Amino acid sequence: MTVTRFAPSPTGYLHVGNLRTALFNYLIARKAGGTFILRLDDTDPERSKPEFADAIQRDLEWLGLTWDRLERQSDRLERYAAATDELRERGRFYEAFETPTELDLKRKKQLNMGKPPVYDRAALDLSAAERDALRETRPGHWRFLLEHARIAWTDGILGEISIDAASVSDPVLIRGDGQVLYTLASVVDDTDMGVTHVVRGSDHVTNTATQIQIMAALGHDHPEFAHHSLLTGPAGEALSKRLGTLALKDLREQGVEPMALLSLMARLGASQPVELQDSLDGLADGFDMSHFGAAPTKFDADDLMPLTARFLSMQPYDAVGGALREAGVPDASAAAFWDAVRDNVTTRADIAVWWDICQNGAEPAIDPDDQTFVAEAMTLLPALPLAETTWAEWTQAVKSATGRKGKALFQPLRKALTGRANGPEMAKLMPHLRVIKAKG
Ligand code: GLU
């Protein structure tokens, strides 16, 4: 059975970059009828915050990326302790004492000598007495002893990968203050929970190499791995600095439609074009990891609003019923009003804007050259309420009276009634007008 997981650390809000990871893992599980786990990587008690854990769940629920199981690493510390015992017994775990400053110095020296900055394993040469003496002065941290061989796997996106373990530092699995680090916790969880597919960003490729060895040291096979490329801005610039402004909660507040965002994300960086889907099932059906490439993927937040508008215009009125009611549109008018405005809303919030124009009247926009024309036209407008046929009849009458036609006829009348040069088909809007401010 296919089991995937999305494993954010609750140390901040989810952004579009995280969403890619969440969505891919969700779609793989859904497509296979498997299990999707939301795992909160919260072993860092200082940086992990309950409000971020809540916000992550709220964001995923907004998108409909619902999980079958919720796990928290902070509930599983005993499992991690058992795994460290095993690694210790197998001679794959050792205590080291270098301070961050000492490590930094070592790295600088190596770089100066043109060597890769890999931990030199000096701690392995310490005698028991030296270790005891060091432990008096500072807490020790624990590293996994990598086997110096090539680590290879077939990546679902990157293809054949092979990394020389000797080019990687022995990973620290437990910090000096006793905190279990992600590398170990993730390995234990992925094996305990039967995770079959791990999709994550390409910044995790080296982690994957070390995790494959840790899994093997604990007697386990590793899941399938796939590393998606990282997102960049529209001009290829690093997105990391802007991710704060691309938080999912902000996009939600701006009125971005979940399916617009998800449809874009499911295809960005893939060889297939973006296809606006109505449901996550539709996205899952068309999802194929092999269509994604290794190159950095450009993301342009400006694409979201046109897609949102397009998604909304395709919706039947009952799909936007909540927004229609919130705007104050009576149920009896809802279907007709939605039909009038559906092609002229960018977000659901625009429904209220058009309803307000209809109910409370718009400040007329009248060009100086059109003052007399509009005033004459208004004397020909029948009394409210108007009907769908009113527009054709009225403009015909105005045409006969003034001799104007085409744009010169229609445009000033639209601007007089709605205050705007663009908007819904006037015939469909007329029955909903309750106040008209332009005077005859
Ligand atoms: N908590 C890790 C992160 O957010 C999870 C990475 C993984 O998927 O293993 O980067």
Image (cartoon, rainbow, N blue to C red):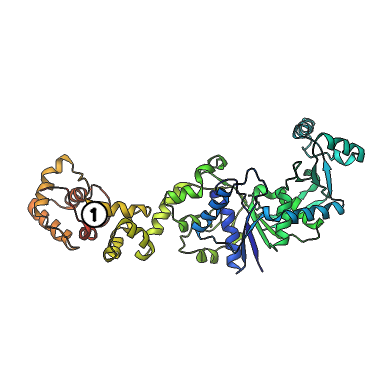
Tell how many labels: 1
Front in this rendered view, residue 184 or 257: 184
Q: Position of residue 304 (x, y in %)?
A: 45, 51
Label 1 environment density (alpha carbons within 10 Å; few <14, some 14–19, many ≥20): many
Q: Residue visible at 62% across and 49% down?
A: 9
Report the residue that reaches farthest toward the left. Answer: 401
Per the image, label 1 sits on a secondary structure element best described as helix
Q: Residue at x 47, y 60 (%)?
A: 275
Q: Quadrant of residue 139?
A: top right
Where residue 155 sits in the image (x, y, percent)? 69, 56
Whether residue 110 is situated above or below residue 48 in the rendered picture: above
Is residue 314 visible in this depiction of the protein?
no
Query: Is 150 positioned to the left or the right of 382 in the image?
Result: right
Q: Amino acid at mark 1?
A: Cys
Q: Nearer the viewer, residue 132 or 152?
A: 132
Judging depth in this view, the residue of 216 and 159 nearest the camera is: 216
Give the side of residue 173 with respect to residue 326, left or right: right
- The quarter of the picture where the N terminus appears is bottom right
Write down the residue under mark 1: 358
